[in-house]
């Protein structure tokens, strides 16, 4: 008999056991009432010895359950399906069964079939479903929302201004839900509406003072608050007749690497602070790694073969006329700049305070890409050429490395445990532990005929987006979605093709489609829902793309993209959907003139609080004003300046503001706090070389290694060790 109760849905099944001792079976017939009214299956057999009836119910008001939990806490999702002789409860996330996986944070399903999640992070948000084993047509959906207390960053920490000039204090806040920002001055509430001098911009993210006076001197406290927490920090303003510089101004510069050498550019005034010519002689300490060109945990401990006084860009065979050749650069905590010289088989380390090269490090042949792992203070190097046997390299399972991916960090996500290696022409991504360098697992993409080209990641629901290349390169293959909780492929990301870019807060996924000329924008909600938001007509083939924080609204971004073949640059407002194309930026480098990456016209932003961007043409460099979406200036006579990196102000912060005092003991090679220096990790197209000191064994898969999410979350807890790289001094 099939019937619907007032309380909800009734699902009835008849279990039959044969006389001959066969296990129970469920045999459906035509007597089926489909949900939501009820669902009943009935089968009678002349050979049945007895009958077992299973009746399952699910109240209508519990078919969808929403649970909200604060990050870092534990939570329990209870399955509301009840009934006599209920089979075991099966839980799914994104269509993947969880019960049989060895997960780090989801490891106990309890006798009542509840799902236990310990130490919830934002990767756990999203949809979960439960059903009784064998009865998938009656299921309950759980939506997990993860709230995060605010975390803020103010800028500048201190500034001095003369009377009559304008001043701005900035406060960037992240949290779930979006925090509300208020300001205090010397502990008292500010009333911007009652003052013509004060104004709040972008929902309080900027406190603007039109014309400062002596009485504006004070400590301004930014307070960010949402329903689960509060955070605050202070930005100090001093108004005096002759405003002294509170810090040595060596930060807030673009480092541009070109044919002629290095140009250090202050973008606000379009002022060249320093030029390092290619012929300038540098005194560099040549260090090599302990095993050929394998990584070293501490560059200070690497054996230095020699100290040389030579040109920064020595002559190379096949280069005429002689010029510098660069490929990749990055900033390490704004204290050092690492830059590769692929034809010299080395990278240079530049001290940003001294603004000079202080060390050269030999690498595998043709180093082309650098990656900085902030969580472990490591620099990884990818080289194009294979390593010869004469280097006595430790061979690993990772041969033919094609690319490397590190999930990004932000104010909420401060630590990353895993990275991913792509191998040439292989339909898989290999997950590696960034601490032990062991391979955790390989995620096969073979069923989707996908060879990974690039990856992106959002911590909201823990989605990885993988750009695919199929067997037929002329046919665009849609992206794949991978769940970082289960390390399982969810499926195609709709029909979205191209390289994915994710905004720093994880809320926007932007994918330029080079075939259609459109840019597709997807959003990720605070409940982990991935939706296609809009399509933008870019009318250009994108070379590079960065995200610029909105100057009109807090917690919003604009996407800025350069053209690989034209003179245009796109500004796209991701929340409102409007876009502007800025033209007249001259022709970029020809793709064949930049063999190191597809980005033949690079684009660099000036950080979280900066308004300026830099992009090169073939013969000059353009500085753009992101706040006004306009051209700021052009700096000529910079040829092939396609390697650009921004250096902020962190290098000028006194160490006492971080931890302790500067100290230098006998035998030390630099300033330190009794802590390690930045490491260099090296991957080669031909080998991945995860060297660990005093360990000369081949790293293998660790049995029982957790396959859980790749990020951990902290709230402003100071690290146990603060690592300040101190290269060997000449």
Image (cartoon, helix red, strand yellow):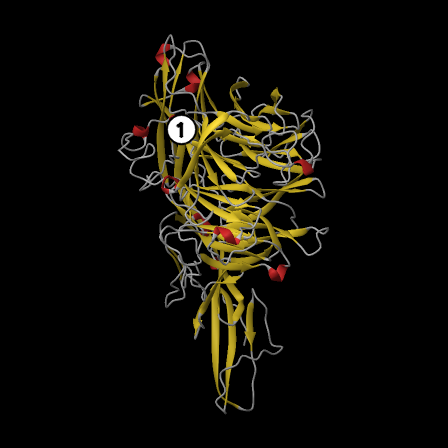
Instruction: Tell me which corner region of the image, top left, top right, bottom left or bottom right, holds residue 227.
Output: top left
Residue 494 visible in this rendered orientation of the protein: no
Residue 673 visible in this rendered orientation of the protein: yes
Query: Residue 100: where, in percent of width, then height?
Result: 45, 67
Q: Residue at x 29, y 38 (%)?
A: 674
Q: Which residue is drawn at 54% across and 61% down?
A: 95
Which of 602 and 2 lies nearest the eye of the viewer?
A: 602
Query: Residue 40: where, in percent of width, then height?
Result: 55, 74
Which of 243 and 439 lies nearest the eye of the viewer?
A: 439
Number of numbered discs on residues? 1
Name the image quarter holding the C terminus. Answer: top left
In the figure, is residue 523 to the left or right of 74?
A: right
Q: In this view, does 728 lie above or below 79?
A: above
Q: Is residue 472 above or below residue 285?
A: below
Query: Residue 293: where, in percent of width, then height?
Result: 47, 47
Name the image quarter holding the N terminus. Answer: bottom right
Which of 1 and 201 lies nearest the eye of the viewer?
A: 201
- Badge 1 crowding class, 10 Å Cα cut-off, few under 14, some 14 to 19, many 20 or more, is many
Q: Name the residue under label 1.
A: 651
In the figure, is residue 517 to the left or right of 331?
A: right
Q: Residue at x 57, y 34 (%)?
A: 326
Q: What element carries label 1?
A: helix
Q: Is residue 199 above or below residue 594?
A: above
Which of 309 and 415 lies nearest the eye of the viewer?
A: 309
């Amino acid at each position: 008999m099939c019937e619907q109760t007032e309380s909800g849905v009734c699902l009835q099944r008849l279990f039959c056991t044969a006389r001959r001792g066969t296990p129970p079976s469920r045999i459906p017939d035509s007597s089926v009432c489909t949900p939501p009214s009820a669902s009943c299956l009935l089968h009678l057999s002349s050979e049945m010895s007895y009958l077992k009836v299973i009746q399952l119910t699910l109240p209508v008001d519990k078919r969808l359950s929403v649970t909200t939990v604060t990050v870092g806490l534990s939570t329990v999702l209870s399955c509301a399906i009840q009934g006599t002789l209920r089979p075991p409860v099966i839980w799914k996330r994104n269509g993947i069964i969880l019960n049989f996986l060895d997960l780090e944070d989801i490891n106990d399903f309890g006798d009542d079939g509840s799902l236990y999640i310990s130490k919830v992070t934002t990767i756990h948000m999203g949809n979960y479903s439960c059903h009784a084993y064998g009865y998938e047509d009656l299921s309950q959906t759980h939506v997990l929302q993860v709230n995060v207390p605010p975390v803020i960053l103010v800028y500048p920490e201190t500034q001095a201004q003369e009377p009559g000039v304008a001043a701005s204090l900035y406060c960037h806040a992240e949290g779930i839900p979006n925090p509300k920002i208020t300001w205090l001055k010397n502990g008292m509430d500010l009333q911007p509406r009652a003052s013509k001098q004060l104004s709040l911009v972008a929902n309080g993210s900027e406190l603007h003072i039109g014309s400062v006076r002596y009485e504006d001197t004070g400590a301004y406290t930014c307070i960010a608050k949402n329903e689960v927490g509060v955070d605050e920090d202070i930005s100090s303003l001093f108004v005096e007749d002759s405003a002294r510089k509170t810090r040595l101004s060596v930060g807030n510069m673009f480092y541009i690497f070109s044919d002629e050498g290095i140009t250090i550019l202050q973008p606000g005034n379009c002022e060249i602070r320093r030029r390092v010519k290619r012929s300038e002689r540098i005194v560099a300490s040549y260090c090599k790694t302990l095993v050929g060109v394998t990584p070293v945990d501490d560059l200070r401990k690497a054996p230095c073969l020699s100290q040389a006084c030579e040109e920064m860009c020595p002559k190379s065979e096949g280069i005429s006329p002689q010029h510098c050749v660069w490929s990749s650069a990055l900033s390490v905590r704004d204290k050092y700049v690492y830059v590769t010289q692929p034809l010299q088989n080395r990278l240079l380390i530049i001290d940003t305070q001294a603004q000079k090269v202080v060390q050269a490090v030999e690498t595998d042949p043709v180093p082309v890409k650098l990656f900085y792992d902030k969580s472990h203070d490591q620099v990884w190097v990818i080289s194009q050429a294979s390593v010869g046997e004469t280097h006595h390299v430790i061979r690993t399972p990772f041969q033919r490395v094609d690319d490397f991916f590190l999930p990004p960090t932000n104010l909420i996500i401060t630590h990353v445990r895993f990275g991913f290696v792509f191998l040439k022409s292989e339909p898989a991504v290999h997950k590696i532990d960034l601490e032990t360098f062991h391979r955790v697992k390989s995620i096969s993409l073979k069923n989707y005929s996908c060879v990974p080209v690039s990856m992106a990641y959002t911590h909201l629901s823990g989605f990885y987006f993988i750009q695919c290349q199929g067997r037929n390169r002329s046919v665009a293959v849609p992206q794949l979605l991978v769940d970082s909780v289960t390390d399982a492929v969810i499926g195609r990301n709709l029909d979205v093709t191209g390289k994915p870019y994710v905004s720093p807060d994880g809320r926007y996924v932007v994918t330029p489609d080079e075939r259609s000329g459109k840019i597709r924008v997807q959003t990720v909600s605070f409940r982990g829902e991935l939706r296609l938001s809009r399509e933008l007509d870019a009318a250009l083939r994108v070379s590079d793309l960065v995200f610029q924080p909105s100057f009109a609204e807090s917690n919003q971004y604009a996407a800025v993209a350069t053209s690989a073949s034209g003179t245009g640059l796109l500004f796209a407002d991701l929340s409102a959907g409007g876009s502007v194309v800025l033209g007249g930026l001259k022709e970029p480098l020809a793709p064949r003139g930049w063999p190191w990456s597809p980005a033949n016209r690079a684009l660099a932003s000036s950080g979280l609080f900066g308004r300026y961007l830099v992009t090169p043409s073939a013969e000059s460099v353009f500085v753009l004003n992101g706040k006004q979406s306009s051209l700021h200036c052009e700096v000529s006579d910079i040829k092939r300046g396609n390697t650009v990196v921004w250096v902020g102000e962190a290098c000028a912060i006194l160490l006492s503001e971080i931890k302790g005092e500067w100290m230098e003991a006998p035998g030390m090679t630099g300033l330190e706090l009794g802590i390690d220096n930045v490491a260099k990790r090296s991957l080669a197209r031909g080998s991945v070389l995860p060297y660990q000191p005093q360990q000369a064994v081949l790293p293998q898969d660790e049995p029982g290694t957790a396959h859980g999410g790749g990020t951990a979350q902290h709230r402003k807890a100071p690290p146990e060790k603060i690592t300040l790289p101190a290269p060997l001094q000449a």
